[in-house]
Image: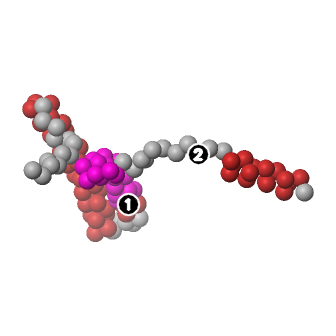
Amino acid sequence: MAAFLIILTGLAVGLISPVYAVQDPAKISDIVEILENIISLLAPAAGIAFFIMMLIGGFQFLTSGGDPKAAGAARSTLTYAIIGIILVVVSWLILVLIRDITGASVTTVTIPEAP
């Protein structure tokens, strides 16, 4: 009976307490903010993809068992993962360099309004 009253009290307190929610947490009021959200997620996604591909390539290399064809496939997976992350980092650095030299905001999305 005591356990039932404790659970019931917890539910009642949870129901009468005010809810403090974040106002517009997704920030999807227009297309520009949607594109900015997508772009801000691409760098971490590239890092996660790099990590996963390195794990896959390492696992392939460890399980190749001396087979030259399997070891070559693992080596190419690792090579392509490294090339991919280098391309992502270099492309971002080029955009930041252009922004610093010209002052143009090339790392943010702007869509002009229709006349």
- The image quarter containing residue 55 is bottom left
Q: In front of the other: label 1 or label 2?
A: 2
Q: How many marks?
A: 2
Q: Residues within 10 Å of mark 1 (few under 14, many from 20)?
A: some
Give 107 or 31, whichever is nearer the viewer. 31
Question: What residue is shown with label 2?
Answer: 19
Closer to the chain start, of discs 1 and 2, is 2
Residue name at image x 45 percent, y 44 percent: 23
Name the secondary structure under disc 1.
helix
Where does residue 112 sit, x and y in percent of width and height? 14, 48
Is residue 42 visible to us here? no
Q: Amino acid at mark 2?
A: Val
Is 43 a magenta residue?
yes
Residue name at image x 15 percent, y 49 percent: 113
Residue name at image x 9 percent, y 50 percent: 115
Q: Which residues are magenta?
A: 28-57
Give 34 or 113, whichever is nearer the viewer. 113
Q: Residues within 10 Å of mark 2 (few under 14, many from 20)?
A: few
- Locate the N terminus and report the quarter of the image it occupies: bottom right
Is residue 28 visible to us here? yes
Q: Amino acid at mark 1?
A: Ile
In the displayed orientation, state which residue is furthest to the right. Answer: 1
Mark identifier at residue 78: none
